[in-house]
Amino acid sequence: MQPGMWIDTHCHLDAADFAADVAAVRQRATAAGVLHCVLPAVAPANFEAVRQLAHRHGDSYALGIHPLCTGEATADDLQALERALAAHRDDPRLVAVGEIGLDHFVPGLDRDRQDYFYRSQLELARRHGLPVLLHVRRSADGLLKHLRRTPVAGIAHASNGSAQQPAEFVRLGFRLGFGGTVTFERALQIRRLAIDLPLSALVLETDAPDIPPHWLYRTPEVR
């Protein structure tokens, strides 16, 4: 990696929004100074897609089961994740278990199922010596509770919450990403966090095609 380059720590380059011109999207990111991306998976169905994209474009990837996918996930999916982590343990482009976590915002999600898959994936990450990419949506306390029991490091993606919650993530070895939300005029708490937290605690992320900055709110990528 080149000194002074930008790293997008959370980009869903395999999303359908980019299917028509994924190579051009990645080239535009490079032209804008984003020379490396981390591509998180959301379910076993896209494990191979993110792996291939990472190798094709010189990026990195993570493998995991997203909390929004836990409604249809089974124990077989956890076994598929463990097999994939073992199969690619020597792949330097595999850098984390993710995207995993808890979502207490979307209605109708079974919190007990989310907890089960989150705990299980924390244990897999610890067993394989990998950090995690966490989905945080009105769920910081629950995420932190399990991290204290199964300590791993990583990135808390799309961070929000009180001043105490981000500080606790940092204490536990995490870095924080905010995505495009930090550009929203009404996101006063997130802006305060971005100012008050030490620079060493922050990472850059787009979460593309989600959470674009306010000036591209209906556009799937940051150009």
Image (cartoon, rainbow, N blue to C red):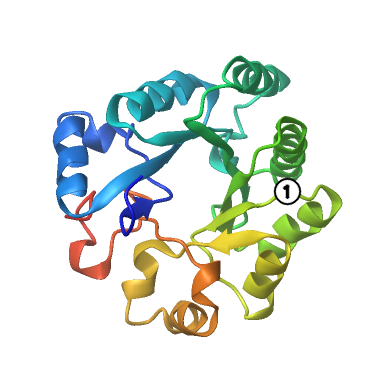
Q: Quadrant of the C terminus?
A: bottom left
Reply above or below: 215 against 133.
below
Q: In the rendering, at what x and y percent does residue 17 appear?
A: 24, 37
Nearer to us in this view, 104 or 135: 135
Q: In the rendering, at what x and y percent does residue 42 appear?
A: 50, 34
Q: Residue at x 36, y 44 (%)?
A: 1
Crowd around label 1: few <14 · some 14–19 · many ≥20 (10 Å): many
Q: Residue at x 20, y 46 (%)?
A: 30
Q: In the rendering, at what x and y percent does residue 211 appear?
A: 35, 58
Q: In the rendering, at what x and y percent does residue 67 appear?
A: 59, 42
Reply above or below: 213 against 88.
below
Q: Is residue 41 left or right of residue 53?
A: right
Reply above or below: 117 against 199.
above
Q: Residue at x 33, y 75 (%)?
A: 184
Q: Residue at x 30, y 24 (%)?
A: 56
* Quarter-of-image position of residue 138: bottom right
> Outermost residue toward the right?
149
Q: Is residue 138 left or right of residue 119?
A: left
Nearer to us in this view, 84 or 221: 84
Which residue in the structure is indicated by mark 1?
152
> For the residue marked with disc 1, what is the amino acid?
Val
Q: Is residue 139 visible?
A: no
Q: Give the number of marks.
A: 1
